[in-house]
Amino acid sequence: MLVVNDAPTTLDLEPRVSLLDALREHLHLTGTKKGCNQGACGACTVLVDGRRVLACLTLAMQVEGREVTTIEGVGPHPLQAAFVRRDGLQCGYCTPGQICSAIGMVAEHRHGAASVVTDDVTTTPDLTPEEIRERMSGNLCRCGAYNGIVEAIVDTAPAMAEMAPALTPVPA
Amino acid sequence: MRPVDYVRPLDVAEVLTLVAERPAARFLGGGTNLIDLIRQGVERPDTLVDTTALPLAGIDTALGGGLRIGATTRNSDLADDHLVRTRYPLLAQAVLAGASGQLRNMATVGGNLHQRTRCPYFVDRESPCNKREPGSGCGALEGIGRSTAVLGTSDHCIAVHPSDMAVALTALEAQVELTGPRGTRQVAMGDFHLAPGETPHLETVTQADELVTAVLLPPPSLGVARYRKVRDRASYAFALVSVAALLDVHDGQIRQARLGLGGVATTPWRAHAAELVLVGAAPTDEVFEAAAAAELAPAKSLPDNAFKVQLARRTIVATLRRLRADGSAS
Ligand SMILES: Cc1cc2nc3c(=O)[nH]c(=O)nc-3n(C[C@H](O)[C@H](O)[C@H](O)COP(=O)(O)OP(=O)(O)OC[C@H]3O[C@@H](n4cnc5c(N)ncnc54)[C@H](O)[C@@H]3O)c2cc1C
Ligand code: FES
Ligand code: FES
């Protein structure tokens, strides 16, 4: 049983079916995109129990009983409006992944996460453009809309932090 | 397609019974490496044993002042942990230097230790590869080899071990706890990964009927430490060279030095030769250069990867200089 965007559904799947294919091919939720299918682009980013993960390297079986949120379950979201305002996209293929990733990223930051560009990892730095670029590096944009993406996140981060659920470690 | 079973056991005893009966079973942590390799036909398990429902996630202080990191702890939870960040910032930095936010949310400690090489010949089933198919030869030795190793290589394999986390664990002298039908044993990080030698397909001491249940860190050492990673782009790329370094200077003399190297070796590399030069000496640029030279003297390079020897030398020296500055500032 999968819970996608608050809707429980039961699917009968071969164990090797990825969450990405389950969403796109079986549940017809095609907002989540398939770019590389090997973890290298971030287009397939979704939220599982509020954490951003790659649907292409997750088996549907692994998230049984967990809350999966795709771009279809996110909107309307202030970050989407900010992407439009700031030209955070061109073709739009990477955008669903960028939006889900940014929501997860802000939640991680609110939870206190440092990053590799944080000089002192015992602290939680402000979400500067440099920090945002590093934390969003798992989402590639072939159109190179990065400047707009970063601006949209800067604009929306405070509002998103308030919306972010408290993160708990992945339940055992 | 051959059928595959998926199971998610709740306790370790159940796992041990299962894998004893099914030699072609594979543990599935986050799946970030294994799922890709299954899709490419490199791994062909008959059973996937999901480890993430086992009661092995979490980080606790251990007897004697160290830490016990459960094997299914996610990489992001490891890097976020308060004790890790304050007492072992080197480890937090190394984990944060790897992969991406999404992948670190998925990847487990046990999976990270066992991740397979990113050598392009290993994943290309058309090419010979002694790791993938023992006895078939090594495509990288004759081929295009920019990503390959210069330390710990053999005539049979020059593939790099790709993990950042493991390089820091090596420098931190961590122990790996393995659990199998014969009970629990601990193996030092320095002995956990196997040099390719004539058997490149054997990568760790983990037996088919064992799983990693924890990583144990000794109490933190004195001194300052840092992880430095050099790669083709600023983020989300494997290391060309990485250095995990710890330096303790007292009264103008190096009391302790620990150095791990990534990106250049077939295993997470402990730079013992460099440490021997450093300990007892003054922390001067000349000593740092001599240490790097001692470590890299046995390096064996090919035309395509020869740049790594120079890059490693410079990165070792730059990291040690930075630590010298950090140390005198604190
Ligand atoms: C695009 C991309 C970029 C990446 N960049 C980096 C990088 O820069 N630096 C870096 O270090 N890594 C990088 N990685 C690799 C990533 O860190 C590993 O894939 C991850 O750590 C593996 O953990 P996992 O839990 O997902 O392992 P899995 O894929 O689930 O398993 C990997 C292997 O470990 C075995 N295993 C799992 N758990 C156990 C256990 N408890 N005991 C015994 N065996 C076990 C499995 O059977 C399998 O053989 C990258 C990966 C991708 C896809
Ligand atoms: S499709 Fe999943 S990361 Fe590219
Ligand atoms: S908008 Fe085209 S890939 Fe990002």
Image (cartoon, rainbow, N blue to C red):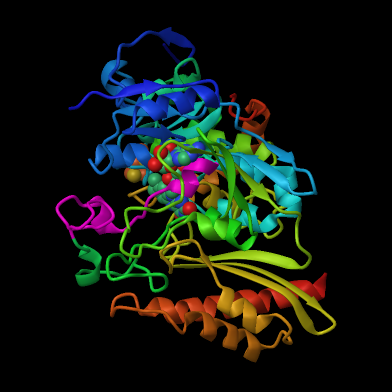
In the image, taking residue B92 as reference, residue A71 lies left or right, namely left
Q: Is residue A136 above or below residue B17?
A: below
Residue under the image location 74 percent in, 87 percent down = B282
User: Which segment did they paint magenta?
Assistant: B109-136
Residues A112 and B280: in front is: B280
Percent position of residue A11, x then y? 33, 11
Quadrant where the C terminus of chain B lies? Answer: bottom right
- Whether the magenta-drawn stretch holds residue B134 is answered as yes
Task: Work out whether residue A86 can be spotted.
Answer: no
Q: Residue at x 28, y 37 (%)?
A: B38
The image position of residue B147, as x and y in percent, is: 34, 66
Q: Can residue A7 be seen by looking at this rendering?
A: yes
- Taking depth in this image into account, of A141 and B114 the one nearest to the observer is B114
The chief SS type of the magenta part is loop
Q: Is residue A157 left or right of residue B85?
A: left
Which residue is depicted at the point 60% across and 70% down?
B259
Residue A1: x and y, percent?
A: 41, 11
Q: How many marks?
A: 0
Residue at the left extreme? B126
Please say whether residue B248 is one of the residues in the magenta stretch.
no
Quadrant hosting ligand 1: top left
Vertical arrangement, residue B143 with respect to residue B41, above or below: below
